[in-house]
Amino acid sequence: MAAPREDGLKYERVLNALRSRIADGTYPPGMMLPSQSRLVAEFDVSRPTVIEALRLLRQEGLIESQTGRGSFVRGKVPTLSLERAYPGQRLLDLAESESLAELLQAGIIVAPTRVTTLLELPAGSKAFLRQYVLSDEDGPVELVSAWFPIDLVTGTKLTSPEPMDEGIRRHLYGRKRLRLDYAVERTLARSATADEAQVLKVPAGAPVLNLVVTGHDADGRALQLVDAVLPGDRHELRDAYPLT
């Protein structure tokens, strides 16, 4: 029987050491890992060995690599599954300019109770709302309301009447260096309000899916909220997962 490859043992040693440091808090959420050169020197291994260990950490959801900057510890580790779609992530990454998006409003208004609660704002607070409707060749398919604390939109293009050419997550990082580390997603079925029915061109009281996703930083602070309303007869929820 062939002996185990030495390179394999080395990358496992690096992988296990970094994984342990993340687990015990030596490398806390948001911290940048040592550079590849420093890891090469510390573990006395080749650069490809370090690169493979980092690749596996990314695959496990423990770190995130940013081009030109390095690798950072993630605040939350997602649960992996065989096949999984995250509708909320699509909303955070959606560029309005790449879809048939019609901007309905962009401004400061008094936020509903659900919005202030999820964004952890005082009751009755004002927040910034960017609202648009997405359509396809058959008509409206989604009403999206993106809410932000007022101080967060300063210096961004969120107030612009023009379609955004990049998703919320990328834009916030590019303009404010605010990184959304994880999302909390909620989905419920209900009846459309009169205003929603008018925008989505469905009968009043028609069934809709309501997807609410909050984006959080590594400290758990909610930086934004996206509330999407989808006609129930034009969408389905699908997931695949192992049975244990």
Image (cartoon, rainbow, N blue to C red):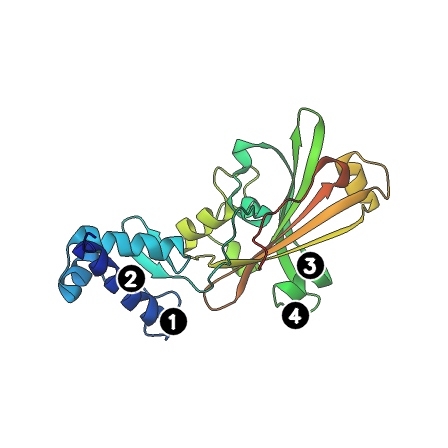
Q: Residue at x 81, y 35 (%)?
A: 202
Which of 113 and 32 lies nearest the eye of the viewer?
A: 32
Q: Say which label, 4 or 2, has the lower sequence index.
A: 2
Task: Name the residue that disc number 3 marks.
Answer: 111
Helix, strand or loop at mark 1: helix
Which of 244 and 129 lies nearest the eye of the viewer?
A: 244
Mark 1 vs mark 2: in front:
2
- Where residue 133 appears, as percent x and y from the top left, is 67, 37
Q: Say which label, 2 or 3, has the lower sequence index.
A: 2
Distance from the alpha carbon under mark 3 to that under mark 4: 10 Å
Distance from the alpha carbon under mark 1 to that under mark 2: 12 Å
Distance from the alpha carbon under mark 3 to that under mark 1: 38 Å
Q: Say which label, 1 or 4, has the lower sequence index.
A: 1
- Where residue 46 appears, as percent x and y from the top left, is 15, 54
The kind of residue on which mark 3 rests is Ala
Q: Residue at x 16, y 66 (%)?
A: 42
The kind of residue on which mark 2 rests is Leu
The kind of residue on which mark 4 rests is Pro
Residue 138, disc: none
Q: Residue at x 21, y 56 (%)?
A: 4
Which of 6 and 2 lies nearest the eye of the viewer?
A: 2
- Where residue 11 appears, as percent x and y from the top left, is 24, 58
Task: Name the residue that disc number 1 marks.
Answer: 23
Task: Name the residue that disc number 4 marks.
Answer: 122
Q: Say which label, 1 or 2, has the lower sequence index.
A: 2
Q: Characterize the local packing of mark 1: few (<14), some (14-19) or many (20 or more) Cα atoms within 10 angstroms.
A: few
- Where residue 178 appears, as percent x and y from the top left, is 44, 57
